[in-house]
Image (spheres, rainbow, N blue to C red):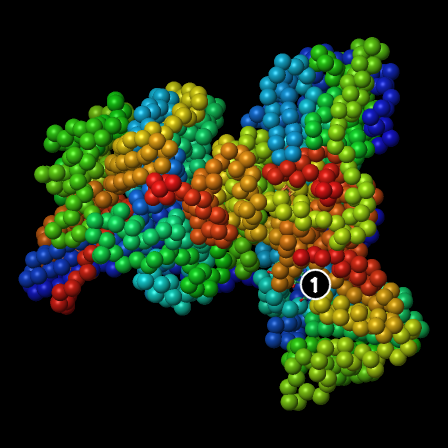
Amino acid sequence: MSREPRRPSVAIWKFASCDGCQLTLLDCEDELLRVAELIDIAYFLEGSSATSDGPFDLSIVEGSISTAEDIERIQTVREKSAAVVTIGACATAGGIQALRNFGDVEELMRIVYATPDFLSVLDTVTPITDHIDVDFELRGCPIDKRQLLEVIGSYLAGRRPQIATDSVCIECKMAGQPCVLVAEGTPCLGPVTHGGCGALCPRFGRGCYGCFGPMDSARPEVLAPLLTTMGMPEDEQYRVFHTFNAWSEPFRDQPRPVPVTLSERSTS
Amino acid sequence: MSDSGATAALPDPAAVSLAIADLDRLISTLRDDGRVVIGPTTRDSVMTLDEIAGAGQLPRGWLDEQSPGKYRATPSETATAFAHGPPSMSWKRFLHEERTLVISTSRTNGAMVIDPAPAAPEKPLAFFGIQACDLAAIGVLDVALADDAAYRRRRDDLLVVAASCTDSVATCFCVSAGTGPRPGPLADIVLTELADGSLIADARTERGAAVLTRAGLDTAATEADCRSAAALVDAAAARQTRHLDTEAIARAAAAPDDVGWDAVAERCLTCGNCTMVCPTCFCTSISDQTRLDDGCAERWQIWASCFSLDFAYVHGGSVRTSPTSRYRQWYLHKLVTWHDQFDSSGCVGCGRCITWCPTGIDITEAITS
Amino acid sequence: MRSEPAVTTLVPTMATVEAVRRELDDTVTLSLALSEPSLTPTPGQFAMLWAPGVGEVAISYSGVGDGSRVDHTIRDVGATTRALTTCEPGAELGSRGPFGRGWDLSRLPGRRLLIIAGGLGLAPLRPVVEAATAGTLGTSSAQLLVGARSPDAMLYRDEISTHWASLEPQLTVDHATDTWKGGVGPVTIALGSAIGDPATVEAIVCGPEIMMRVVARELMDRDVAPDAIQVSLERNMQCGVARCGHCQLGPLFTCVDGPVLRWDEAEPLLAVRER
Amino acid sequence: MTHKAGAGRLDTEALSRVEGEGGMHVRIVDGKVDDVKLRIFEPPRFYEGFLRGRAHTEPPDITARICGICPVAYQMSACAAIEDACGVEVGESIEELRRLLYCGEWIESHTLHVHLLHAPDFFGVDSAIELAALDRGAVERGLELKKIGNEVLEVIGGRAIHPVNVRIGGFYRAPARSTLQAFRPRLDRALELAVAATDWVAGLDFPDLDTEHELVCLVDGEHYPVLGRRLISDRGLDIDIAEFGDHIAETHVAHSTAKHAHLLDRGNYLVGPLARFSLARDRLGPVATAAADRAGLGAECRSPFQSIVVRAVEVVHACEEALRVIDGYQPPEPAAQPVPPRAGTGHGATEAPRGMLYHRYSIDGDGIISDADIIPPTSQNQPTIEHDLFHFVEANLDMPDDALRRAAEVTIRNHDPCISCATHFLDLTVDRGPEGES
Ligand SMILES: Cc1cc2nc3c(=O)[nH]c(=O)nc-3n(C[C@H](O)[C@H](O)[C@H](O)COP(=O)(O)OP(=O)(O)OC[C@H]3O[C@@H](n4cnc5c(N)ncnc54)[C@H](O)[C@@H]3O)c2cc1C
Ligand code: SF4
Ligand code: SF4
Ligand code: SF4
């Protein structure tokens, strides 16, 4: 039951992402120096020039897999690490860049780059669990700071993180926040979205837009008709389910109305 | 709950009459007694509950409409503060908080010591304007949480100023649940509001009478006022259109598997809103948290919902995986097995689960269709 | 109304691990000394054992002692049981209890007792087995039937072959090894010869839920009355005092109305489709 | 060994203490620097591609995800560009609230760079955590200051990273006056900390290095630049942001095909703190001005090393500015102007902590985006950073390998490049030639 005398070594890795989730660690202003005493931050490029080759007790992985080189690197991370925790929508669901999976990569490349031939990217962007075994996935775009601390704290204590997998609605109610969907007719993804943010959007008078991805046993197919009756057109619904967690099930299976893309719009 | 029926007797002849302005005196008397006064108030265009410092914070001049999956409150010309449906949240959160510390640990000379959660000398509470259904819910929680130290502590100190309902919204069914619209026996004082906003106050306990006296409220109510108050409450009762379907409940109790749950479950998001707004749902999870600074542990009791997949988790998975089985647990617990466990129904007819269910699933007709 | 729990607190008593005995690869028995004596547990009751900072889980008493010394046999299946099973002597734990309804031993005098265990289900039966061996239950006769996945997974094998030999143990495994001398197959294969006169039988059964269903069905097929079969159910338990709500099974809070139920009580509840 | 003779490479596999992942690649041939490249491993994420077909209401949320360090900048530039396309002008009170939100980001992002990323260089340590062992007070002060910056973002935006309260036209909910008033003491505290931090960094040792880049920033009325529609430079550039494309092009430079921004006919330029400070020093608040004077900053500052001081001064200014906004704050009513879609193209730019960030969107009559272009500050500065690096390495070829590599990294960090922002950088610096040993 007593804490290991040796400080566990922790590495923080980045794949395709915006850096926001690993920044969350630096945003733990009150706890950062204490955390650094409890764990040995052995590899964290964003925070330190000192790097270790491992092995590591815990690897925290941000970002999704989008290049062939990423696939090799994530395997190495797994081999070097006793435990792997992924953080954020990119790592757990592919992130917004996984929108590429629904379209044509070549076309995207042409839109953005004059000489796309030089790019080497995979056709699909995938979450880390598609490639290696992951010990725990922390959701959010971005992750929540308190939850990150809970992941680290629970790791140190040797327990599973106490992180609820049910809806944002539960957090909304716990916060005493009146429901914007029922009381204002504002479309809200809360009933299908994984809690963790503390019902942030409803607290700001806005419907949840799903940045923590689907909750356990989410039923977007039940919510969709409701959104329709609230005046949210189907193409808009498609878009709202297809943002930062677009590639997670069951969001990715939300039916795709036509027209949704530009070319479809011009032909219909 | 004998005097809670729709056609109960007139208020006590000793009832006193209150002008709108007297409410402030009543509230400040309670506050002067060192109580935190909780009452209905508007926030984000919704009537909710919060600490109030004066009658100005009551939702006077607001009207609400509630229907399955829909709530709208709008400012209006009315002079009344209590002619509304149940507030968005229930009062349970003030007695049975969302998060309660159970114990924490510390170290003394290297040995681990358990420190039970401090029985903090909290200020006693006064519930101001609690309606009959919600008051009945406290009676229900009194049984279910009889052994819960934190609940008991707050409950024992509670003073209740209830409000008779002079209006019903479309989701109300307290008459059929046998809990309203007249507040039942747990009230210390019962207020009944007239159309012009003046009120009749009826002390039900000595404690309640003493509060009225201290507030200097002693103008006897006229019989005419008492009659119109009673008529308003009766009219509110008469307006209710929803009723518990006793036949369906009996069928479900007898043969839970033969009931058509799937039609309801098809519309259930398993979001848990119904359990969160329910004034009697008491379930919690208990979990450990470790403090980073000193490594000591805390155990927290946190609201839980039987709609969450991991609610019934045992090693290897949940015993209730389908939405059907989770909806059935909620329905049967509220309306059937609660009787076995606690000798009463778990449903008090407030209708919140109907209003606040995003898809408007209606417990009064969930399994009739 | 639900049963009233005798212990209602969420505050554990500290306990010290006095001895750790490895039973199987993933299973150990902890002997605990409680800093304040609890009520003496009835066999079949359980405690909430707390690994501070990790979690609290329901664990049956595998030795009931006198309320200040108790045994628990624990299998490592997750974070909390990991923390418990890796305790060393001297470690501090929290314990609350005893909770729940234990085995109904008042029914046993004059009857033929069948103790039927599957896997780890033998742990909560151990105090009954010991009493049966000591002859303090007043039964006319008693026999022990134990099933396990494999010989390696058979709990308390030494005790079975020594101290408990008087109960004529019938052992079966799903997967035998070359040296295995017992039966191969489900524990029910030994039932036929064990029952004798079904009218005199009282069966107490503990194991995975599916195993208990099969055993109960088999016993009833052989004319044992459903109310003469006792089983012990597992549900998610967090408070132990019928307050957190997780362990509900129909009208029951299994933590106080169970975990031990008679089959006539349990069967209709288990028959409701849960999934 | 040194690089005076022979051929060699000086590579840093992965730059540390920058946001995002990048490397540095220097090729030395015959004792001369032949090629310098800032490599970006950040895999392309194709934002501009998948913005096509999205609704005009979405870019604030979507483009925020380009960068977790300066999401507000993306949200603000996106709003400005879409409102421009739709012909909507938000009122002064919404602009003020935007400035306030932005102050939070400047405080948070600059303080992160000053204390956690840049300062360790001046003490010869690897990280702020090591720095804390030498000067815990300074690190704690930085963390406290950064925290207050994040709190501004939380109060107004809901959370520090990817705030939820921003929408085109304004905000979902405007904070109450009382909420902001109640927050005022935190900013008083921040101001105190920021002044102390400036005095602290002013005392560091700076190598001599003045650069001659053209400095570019926005003009924001009488304010120190944050929002605004005019773009100026110290060499006479003075254009409306809608003319951005006529003056600044993303071209392919000779040594690589990476997208770099250049002023047409003039080449490299620099955006960011040095540019803002040099072009708008007279608009700093009084406390920031005094702090800059005390720190010995002249009328302009062209030393990339001293950018740490300029950032600290900008943090002081951001605290003052936040207090100014709070004191004059009236909640905008409504919290957001309606922005009905209208076919057209809009341009918007705002001053991210790292410099001017430009967005352009074309939308159709239903508000569907048909084209998007985003040019982050780091794209604009990349040629300039490489230029600095080139000269720095050339001047210091006799340094030992490790020291040179370290110093070169510092040269890059001076500019606080945000590689996550590099929405469309290409890593094309693969050295296909024969490799000399270094
Ligand atoms: C009445 C009763 C008696 C038991 N007796 C024993 C025993 O003698 N020996 C033994 O090894 N195990 C026993 N168990 C099972 C033991 O409680 C679980 O193995 C344990 O809860 C798993 O927790 P964990 O944290 O290690 O694993 P995880 O699988 O990580 O569990 C996470 C959480 O889920 C819940 N949970 C998981 N499985 C169960 C379960 N079966 N019952 C209740 N809650 C669960 C708990 O809240 C636990 O904290 C008993 C269970 C019950 C209900
Ligand atoms: S506002 Fe959204 S998240 Fe909150 S309860 Fe309503 S539907 Fe659920
Ligand atoms: S309905 Fe569900 S949440 Fe409510 S008390 Fe019953 S089991 Fe608990
Ligand atoms: S009944 Fe309604 S409120 Fe309850 S879980 Fe189902 S959808 Fe949610």
- Would you say B159 lies left or right of D66 here? right
Q: Which residue is mark 1?
A: C59
**Foreground residue, C131 or D243?**
D243
- Would you say B359 lies left or right of B156 here? left
**Foreground residue, D81 or D430?**
D81
Q: How many callouts does the rendering have?
A: 1
Can residue A42 be seen at all in this image of the molecule?
A: yes
Can residue D197 be seen at all in this image of the molecule?
A: no
* Picture quarter with the N terminus of chain B: top right
Q: Amino acid at mark 1?
A: Ile
Q: Secondary structure at mark 1?
A: strand
* Residue at 10% across, 53% down: D394
* Residue at 33% across, 23% down: D89
Whether D80 is drawn above or below D373: the answer is: above
On whether ligand 1 comes within 8 Å of the CB at mark 1, the answer is yes
Report the residue that reaches farthest toward the bottom.
C179
* Picture quarter with the C terminus of chain B: top right
- Would you say D206 lies left or right of B23 here? left
**Picture coordinates of residue D257 (x, y %)?**
17, 52
